[in-house]
Image: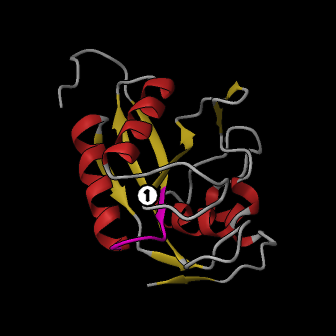
Amino acid sequence: MMLNQGLEYSTAYLLLGGNLGDRVANLEKAIELLNDKIGKVIAVSSLYETAAWGKTDQPAFLNQAVALQTNLSALAVLDLALSIEQELGRVRKDKWGERLIDIDIILFGDQIINIPDRLQVPHPHMKHRKFVMEPLAEIAPQVLHPVLGETMLSICRNISDPLEVKKL
């Protein structure tokens, strides 16, 4: 991966997840491809296992948060993340359905992005989902939510999501 000299870098926080196949290997390969194609991975959370959210009649998910530094735009990161999902065998069928890999942009620096049906940053549901906030608070406890003005740790501590999230 080539990072252009002199360009400004952003720290992107991504949530990876999957509940099919070799979940650990799928997450590891996704991190390797993110590092190769999007930017330097600077932090990786522990693995967290959680029951499926939204559509509950499926296997448990493994989730992991990743921070990376990139000189790409948020839309370029989104497009590359989607291509990485495809490369790893992701097929989009059902909303909240089973998947080999899922890569979501949760935060992108302090940017606020709202492109309906394409990209919303900060992720609009992050503050309601424990499986997002626990790994994110682990690697970015003092990072501020650009809309709420609260730290990731504070949001995580005050979340009302009843879904059990287990750190492995």
Q: Is residue 157 magenta?
A: no
Task: Give 61 or 135, whichever is nearer the viewer.
Answer: 61
Confirm whether the magenta stretch covers residue 17.
yes
Image coloring type = secondary structure
- Please identify the quadrant where the C terminus is shown: bottom left
For image coordinates 52% across by 35% down, the residue present is 109
Front-lying residue, 49 or 136: 49
> Where is residue 96 shown, x and y percent of the image?
66, 59
Lateral position of residue 50 relative to residue 54, left or right: left
Give the residue at mark 1: 101
The spot of residue 132 in percent (x, y) is 60, 62
Q: Which residue is rendered at x = 33% and y = 73% of the image? A: 22
Q: Secondary structure at mark 1?
A: loop
Q: Quadrant of the N terminus?
A: top left
- Residue at x 35% of width, y 38% of height: 69
Res 100 quadrant in image: bottom left
- The residue most toward the right is 160
Relative vertical location of residue 147 with respect to residue 111 in this rendering, above or below: below
Image quarter of residue 38: top left
Mark 1, other Cα within 10 Å: few <14 / some 14–19 / many ≥20: many
- Number of numbered discs visible in the structure rendering: 1
Q: Residue most toward the top?
A: 6
Name the residue nearer the viewer: 106 or 81: 81
Find residue 148 and report its image quarter. Answer: top right
Tell me if 13 is positioned left or right of 124 in this view. Answer: left
Disc 1 marks a residue whose amino acid type is Ile
Q: Position of residue 81 (x, y in %)?
A: 41, 39
Identified at 23% across, 52% down, the residue is: 32
Q: Is residue 82 left or right of residue 56?
A: left
Q: Which residues are magenta?
A: 16-22
